Image (spheres, rainbow, N blue to C red):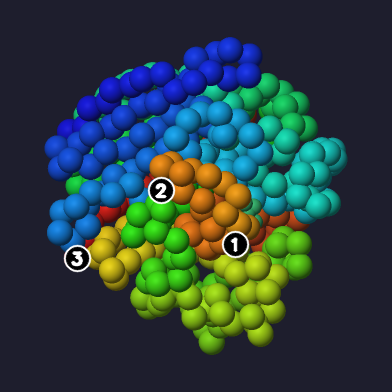
Amino acid sequence: MSSITSKPFGTTEDGKPIRLYTFTNAAGMSADVSDLGGVIVALRTPDRDGAFADITLGYETAEPYLRKGPYFGALIGRFANRLEGAAFELNGAEYALAKNDGDNTLHGGREGFDKKLWDAEIVEAPNGAGQALRLTYVSPDGEEGYPGTLRATVTYSLTDDNELVLDYEAVTDRDTIVNLTNHAYFNLAGHAAGDIGGHVLTIDADKFTPVNAACVPTGEIREVDGTPFDFRKPTPIGPGLAKTDDEQIRNGGGYDHNFVLNVGGEKLEKFAEVYEPTTGRVMEAFTTKPGVQFYSGNFLNGSEIGKGGAAYGKRSGLCLETQYFPNSMKHKNFPSPILRPGETYKHTTSYKFSAR
Ligand code: GLA
C-alpha cells in the first residue's frame, strides 16, 4: 500500500501555494505529483539490478510549469491534441477556440488544464492501493470557448505492483466535448539519458489515423501493416523515425500520431509495452480509452532545462497519451467526445513498471 507525503512546490502568479505530493509504495517505487496541472514531476522505478532512477522528464521547481512549454507530465484538457480550424460545431452552434497551433487549437487552448491549480485531497485509493491523490478542477462555462461547466476529477494511485493508475471522471451541466489525458514523457534509461530511439515499443493497434502537414488527422483510418506504424510486435523506435521517405513520418516530424487501439472500452486492458534494453526497464500501459497519441518528442530541442540541469534534446522522451482521437468533431467515423448532462466521462489509464 502506498502512502503520500507533501511539501510546498512554489506559488502561482496570483500567489496561491502549489504543493508536491510524493507517493511511496511497499516496493520502494515513488512518484511525485503536483496539484499544479496534475503534473507527474518524477517517477523512480528499478532497473534489472534493482537500481532506482527517475524516468520521467520534468522540472525541479513549479515556475517553468507555469510557462508555455512541452506539457511535461501534465494533465491535458478540456480537449487533448488538435481540433482543426480551432472551432467545432455542436447542436448546430459553432464554438470558436484559441488558435494556439497555427490555425488549429492544441491541448485545451491558451491556458489549458495543465496550467490550472487543482484542488487536492488525499483519499482512500479505489483499488485498495492505500492513499490516493484526488485532484479536482471546475472549468467554468465558456472557459477557452468550451460550453458548459465541466467538473473534472483525476485520482492518482500507486499499487505495490508498481502500477501508477489515473482514474479520470468529468461531468457537465451543458452539452460539451471532453478529452482528457496525461502528457508524461518517459525515458526508461533515465530522464536525462537522451535519445529514445533504442526503446522497443509494442502497441496493440492494427490501424492509425494519418495526419496532414499540420499534424491534424485527415479522417482516414489506415492499416499499420507494411508501414513504420506497425508496432504490433516489439519494434525499436529509431529505425521508423529514420524513414523520412514516409509521408506520415514527415508530416509528424517523427511519430506524432493517434493509434486506433484494438483494446479499450469498459475493461482496463493492456495496449502498449515499452522496453529499454540497456537497463531492462519495462513499462506496460493499460487503458479504457479508444486511442493513444504516440509522440516521440520531436519538438524538444535542448532549450528546456529540467531536473538536475538536464537539457532535454530532440527525442529524449516519448509520450503515450491515451485519448479520444484528435479532430474527432470533424470526422463522424471517429468515436464521439461529446459529453451531455447526466452522463459521466469515466476512464482509467495506468502505467506499470518492472525490469527484466
Ligand atoms: C502532442 C502533440 C504534439 C505536440 C506535443 C507537445 O503530442 O501531438 O504535436 O504538441 O503534444 O509539444
Image: 183 above or below 231: above
Identify the amino acid type marked 1: Asn
Q: Position of residue 190 (x, y in %)?
A: 35, 54
Q: Which mark is first along the chain, 2 or 1?
A: 2
Q: Residue at x 64, y 50 (%)?
A: 81
Disc 3 marks a residue whose amino acid type is Arg
Q: Is mark 1 within 8 Å of ligand 1?
A: yes
Amino acid type at image mark 2: Thr
| Circle 3 residue | 356
Give yes or no for contact between labels 1 and 3 (Cβ–Cβ under 8 Å): no
Residue depicted at x 68% and y 21%:
140
Q: Is residue 160 above or below residue 331?
A: above
Instruction: Report helix, strand or loop for mark 2.
Output: loop
Residue named by callout 1: 298
Query: Label 1: how many residues lie within 10 Å, few (<14), some (14-19) or many (20+)?
Result: some
Q: Nearer the viewer, mark 3 or mark 2?
A: 2
Q: CA distance from mark 1 to mark 2?
A: 16 Å
